Image (cartoon, rainbow, N blue to C red):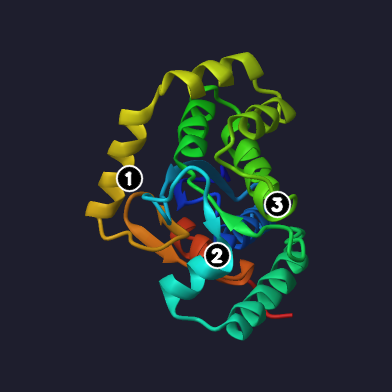
C-alpha cells in the first residue's frame, strides 16, 4: 500500500522555544510513520515580536512585561522547556541567550530556502533554532544567517544577496497576514491539508495519533 500524502504547514518563529519542541515532536511522529505517511512539510512565517528593534531587548525584562511573569516563573518554565527539549534531542542551553531579537530577516531567508527544494528549508529552520536556543546567537544578524545557511549546504553568497536586497519581504508579509487572518495568533500552529489544526508544543504521541487518524491508519497498539 502506498504512503498517504499529507501537506503540513508549520507556522512558527525561530525565537519560539515551543516551536523547536513542536517541530522535533512532529518529526519524531513522522519517523514512526515512515512508509505509511509521506509529509510535504513547509515552514510558514510568524513573528512573536514584529515590532522588535534590530538590537533586540533584554529577555527577562521583555517577558516580564509581555506576560506579567515573575523571574521565578520564567526560570521554572525554562527548566521545563530544557527537559522537554533534551527528551527530543534538542539542546536549550542554560542562560545561553539573554536577549530576544527581530526575526523578520530569518523568515525571508527561510522563504528563499524553501524555493531551493529538497530539505533545505527544514535544515535551515533547525539550524536557526539551534543558533538562538543552543548557541545564544542573534537570529536577525546577517552574518549568523549566512553562516547557518552555508552550514546546511545553501549558497552563502546567494543568501547574502537575499538579505541585503530585502528580497521576499512582500511574500513573507503576505503569508504573515494570511495566517493572522485565519486566526493564528500563537505558535507553533501545525495545519494539515489546509483543514486540521494542532497548536502548541505537543508531545510526539499527540502528533502521531492525529496523523494516523488523518491518514486512515489504525491507532497505535498500546504497549
Q: Earlier in the sequence, mark 1 or mark 3?
A: 3
Can you give x and y, in whole percent of width and height, for residue 92 in the image?
73, 61
State the residue position of label 1: 176
Describe residue 24's horizontal placement relative to residue 38 as left or right. right
- Front residue (pair 72, 171): 72
Going 51% across and 60% down the picture, which residue do you hit? Answer: 211
Is the residue 189 above or below the residue 157 in the image?
A: below
State the residue position of label 3: 136
Crowding near pointer 1: few (<14 within 10 Å), some, many (20+)?
some
Q: Earlier in the sequence, mark 2 or mark 3?
A: 3
Crowding near pointer 2: few (<14 within 10 Å), some, many (20+)?
many
Can you give x and y, in whole percent of width and height, for residue 148 in the image?
68, 33
Q: Nearer the viewer, mark 2 or mark 1?
A: 1
Please, what secondary structure does the residue beneath circle 3 have? Answer: loop
Q: How many marks?
A: 3
Can you give x and y, in whole percent of width and height, for residue 196 in the image?
36, 60
Q: CA distance from mark 2 to mark 1?
A: 24 Å
Can you give x and y, in whole percent of width and height, for residue 50 in the image?
38, 50
- Front residue (pair 3, 191): 191
Amino acid at each position: 500500500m502506498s504512503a498517504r500524502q499529507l501537506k503540513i504547514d508549520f507556522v512558527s518563529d525561530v525565537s519560539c522555544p515551543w516551536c523547536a519542541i513542536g517541530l522535533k515532536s512532529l518529526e519524531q511522529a513522522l519517523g514512526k510513520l515512515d512508509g505509511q505517511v509521506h509529509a510535504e512539510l513547509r515552514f510558514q512565517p510568524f513573528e512573536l515580536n514584529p515590532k522588535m528593534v534590530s538590537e533586540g531587548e533584554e529577555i527577562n525584562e521583555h517577558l516580564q512585561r509581555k506576560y506579567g511573569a515573575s523571574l521565578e516563573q520564567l526560570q521554572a518554565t525554562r527548566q521545563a522547556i530544557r527537559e522537554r527539549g533534551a527528551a527530543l534531542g534538542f539542546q536549550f542551553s542554560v542562560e545561553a541567550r539573554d536577549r530576544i531579537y527581530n526575526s523578520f530577516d530569518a523568515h525571508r531567508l527561510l522563504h528563499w530556502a524553501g524555493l531551493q527544494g529538497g530539505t533545505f528549508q527544514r535544515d535551515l529552520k533547525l539550524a536557526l533554532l539551534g543558533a538562538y536556543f543552543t548557541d545564544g546567537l542573534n537570529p536577525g544578524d546577517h552574518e549568523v544567517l549566512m553562516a547557518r545557511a552555508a552550514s546546511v549546504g545553501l549558497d552563502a553568497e546567494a543568501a547574502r544577496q537575499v538579505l541585503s536586497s530585502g528580497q521576499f519581504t512582500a511574500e513573507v508579509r503576505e503569508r504573515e497576514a494570511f495566517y493572522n487572518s485565519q486566526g493564528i495568533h500563537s505558535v507553533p500552529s501545525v495545519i494539515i491539508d489546509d483543514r486540521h489544526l494542532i497548536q502548541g508544543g505537543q508531545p510526539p504521541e499527540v502528533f502521531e495519533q492525529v496523523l494516523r487518524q488523518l491518514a486512515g491508519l489504525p491507532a497505535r497498539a498500546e504497549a
